[in-house]
Image (tube, rainbow, N blue to C red):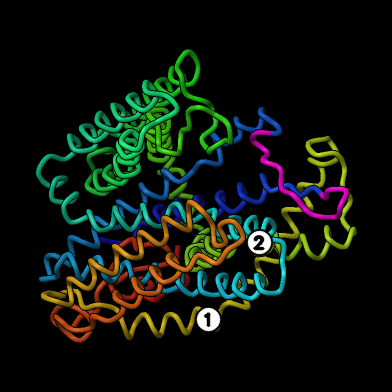
Amino acid sequence: MSRDRYVDFLRAWAILLVVLGHWLITGLVRRPDGALTAPEMLLALPWTQWLTLGFQIMPLFFLAGGHAAGGSWARSRDAGGTAAGWVGQRAVRLLLPTAAYSGLVLLAVGVCGPLGVDPATLALVGWAMAMQFWFLPVYLLISVLTPALYALHRRWGLRVPVVMGVAGFGVGAFVAAVGPPRSGLVEAVGAVNYLLVWGVVYQLGFCWRDGLLTGGGRRTPTALALGGGAVFAALVGPGPFPVSLILVTGQELSNTDPPSAALLAWAVAQVGVALWIAPAVRRALERDRAERAVRALGSGSMALYLWHMLPVLIVAAAFYLTGLAPEPGYGSAGWWALRVPWLLILGTVLAGVVRALRPLERMLASVERAVRPDAGLRGAAAWRVWAGLGASVWALTCFAGHGFAPGGAFPVPAALGLAAGTALLALPRRGGGPHGVNGTRGGEGEEGLDDEGGGPGDGGELQGAA
């Protein structure tokens, strides 16, 4: 099956909006004592919560991920690959750059603490550098479940996301009905929606790839877009859920922590819109310039995703701590006008950061090729993959929830967990052919955060990651 560049476009667009969204909501204010603070825009300016309808774009990433993973797993399975081998390959590709990024940030935290950096400032910076990490443990867990989810898809098709969606809607309704304060049991039930809600979109990616969503032209995409949009409107209008699709401090209900019924409806609507506009975007991608732009964004997607908050720290030090940046009132017309140069400067700095990271990316690509688990991994080596994934998911969840410097302290358990998990995943090397099943390289066509699954030569090098 030829590579679908529209899938690459969805991933690139999702990453781009994640970066721009994080930059847009990060507004720095200098207190009278000279310290910098970052007010929560969605709380300080409540009308901006409507902007999250455009910037909460991660459903597209899970949709593209499911489309890609379905083909990748099917090819690996047909060639004799095992679930452990396939999951291990994808996990290593994701975790190596994540571990490198985390290691460098943790090194900075370990140095700044003894030097007397204010713990509150260190905690804020540590949170900012980990704010995007919520995605990683969720995506890893869904990757682990992919062989089982794909088997369900092959047997029951569209009925699988429908059943998962009903279950996710029910969990969301239960959490909303209980309301705060919630017991540990309720929190645990709500956490299931991280897999159910995002799993629905991932499963729809399988259906999309196999033509189950587009066989009737635009009728199904139109129904998904209008139906999902209508349910979302009902849930955030007369219904109990807030409009913001990003967590806002103080709100009794959240659409993302855990994923709510409203977020599920909006995700379904996004899937419908994405499939509806696909023919027009595919025609645009036939132009060489557009395809090159998508390739460039896709190849550097992991670096963009991981490192995009570093320019905020650099610009803060260069312009705000020195007093060079003008500081109109937060949320004023002048402040919004300065968002344009703010974004342009951050983009320029990030381009320099990505360029400076190229030697590290080449080294990681070399390491990944050397340690990638074989597609036919079995036995004790397979158990090391599962153990490594467990440790890594736990550590990444800790970073996502508490940052790299919770309370200004070094997070020793989480740091050791990520190091141990990554090492366990990198240890297995044999179990099939030299690089995969029957001596073929596993995971052809992989690019950036994920792989579309084209044929050999469709870009099979680690170019960054997430």
| Residue 92: image location, x then y, percent | 34, 72
Q: Residue at x 17, y 34 (%)?
A: 159
Residue 121 located left or right of residue 241: right
Residue 384 vertical placement versus 36 (above, below): below
Which of 22 and 389 lies nearest the eye of the viewer? 389
Number of numbered labels in the structure image: 2
Residue 180 placed where, x, y %? 45, 27
Is residue 34 toward the left or the right of residue 115 in the image?
right
Quadrant position of the N terminus in the picture: bottom left
Q: Is residue 118 left or right of residue 104?
A: right
Residue at image x 46%, y 56%? 286
Residue 343, which numbered label? none
Among numbered discs 2 and 1, the one appearing first in the sequence? 2
> Which residue does the numbered mark 1 point to in the structure image?
360
Q: Which residue is mark 2?
A: 122
39 part of magenta stretch: yes
Residue 171 left/right relative to 408: left
Nearer to me, 93 or 415: 415
Q: Position of residue 275 (x, y in %)?
A: 38, 40
Say which quarter of the image contains residue 248: top right
Which quadrant is the C terminus positioned in? bottom left
User: In the displayed structure, would residue 96 be above or below residue 121?
Assistant: below
SS at circle 2 = helix
Report the magenta residues as a range: 30-43
Front: mark 2 or 1: 2
State yes or no: residue 123 in magenta. Answer: no
